[in-house]
């Protein structure tokens, strides 16, 4: 009996742009064109990224207008404050971001060789978390689990390198 570890969809009342605009209005800020470009770009696909990767990806998409580096960093901070993105880890001193709005709660496997992040969801882990919290009278707001290791591609590459035929 295997458990389904895939991520399922989450229905949300507002689009990411609407949700962010609501957050900005509550802070007496406005949704500028650069912020709109960033929110739309970030939420049109789901991947993990750092600020430099986001800036490079924006520059590579020729249809996008220029977004300044300070605006990228400021907007990423605002998206974290708004609960739409979360920092899941630091990689070489840079924050790695993950979607939090419109995506189900999930955990990660992190390959220390190639840096790949694999998302998964486990009801069993959630049950354990809730049982431990209940035992201690603790109310869970959120959790983050990153399992460090080596992905199957990196493991198979290591195995191939160590074959006797490869040493001839």
Image: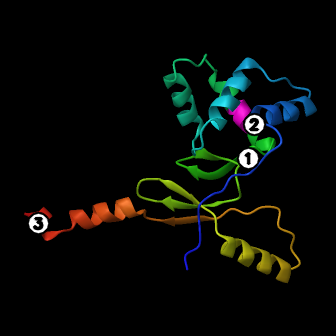
| Residue 69 at x, y percent in the picture | 62, 25
Q: Is residue 68 magenta?
A: no
Magenta-tinted stretch: 73-78
Task: Identify the residue position indicated by label 1 in the image.
Answer: 102
Crowding around mark 2 (Cα neighbors within 10 Å: few <14, some 14 to 19, many 20+) is many
Which comes before the other along the chain, label 3 or label 1?
1
SS type, badge 1? loop
Residue at horizontal 48%, vertical 53%?
Answer: 116
The C terminus lies in quadrant: bottom left
Task: Identify the residue position indicated by label 3 in the image.
Answer: 165
User: To which quarter of the image does residue 63 belong?
Assistant: top right
Query: From the viewer's perspective, is 134 left or right of 45?
Result: right
Residue at horizontal 67%, vertical 49%?
Answer: 87
Which comes before the other along the chain, label 2 or label 3?
2
Q: Nearer the viewer, mark 3 or mark 1?
A: 1
**Numbered mark located on residue 136 in the image:** none
Crowding around mark 3 (Cα neighbors within 10 Å: few <14, some 14 to 19, many 20+) is few
Q: Residue furthest bottom?
A: 135
| Residue 102 at x, y percent in the picture | 73, 47
Task: Identify the residue position indicated by label 2 in the image.
Answer: 16
Residue at horizontal 70%, vertical 50%?
Answer: 103
Closer to us: 14 or 72: 14
Q: Main secondary structure of the magenta part?
A: helix
């Amino acid at each position: 009996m295997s458990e389904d570890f895939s991520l399922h969809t989450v229905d949300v009342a507002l689009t990411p742009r609407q949700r962010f605009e609501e957050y900005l209005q509550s802070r007496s800020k406005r949704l500028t064109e650069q912020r709109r470009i960033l929110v739309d770009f970030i939420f049109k696909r789901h991947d993990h990224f750092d600020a430099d990767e986001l800036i490079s990806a924006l520059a590579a998409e020729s249809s996008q207008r220029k977004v300044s580096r300070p605006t990228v960093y400021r907007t990423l901070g605002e998206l974290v404050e708004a609960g739409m993105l979360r920092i899941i880890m630091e990689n070489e001193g840079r924050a790695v971001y993950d979607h939090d709005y419109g995506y189900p709660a999930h955990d990660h496997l992190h390959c220390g060789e190639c840096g790949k992040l694999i998302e998964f969801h486990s009801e069993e882990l959630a049950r354990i978390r809730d049982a431990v919290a209940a035992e201690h009278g603790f109310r869970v707001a959120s959790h983050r689990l990153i399992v460090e290791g080596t992905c199957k591609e990196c493991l198979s590459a290591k195995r191939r390198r160590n074959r006797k035929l490869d040493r001839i």
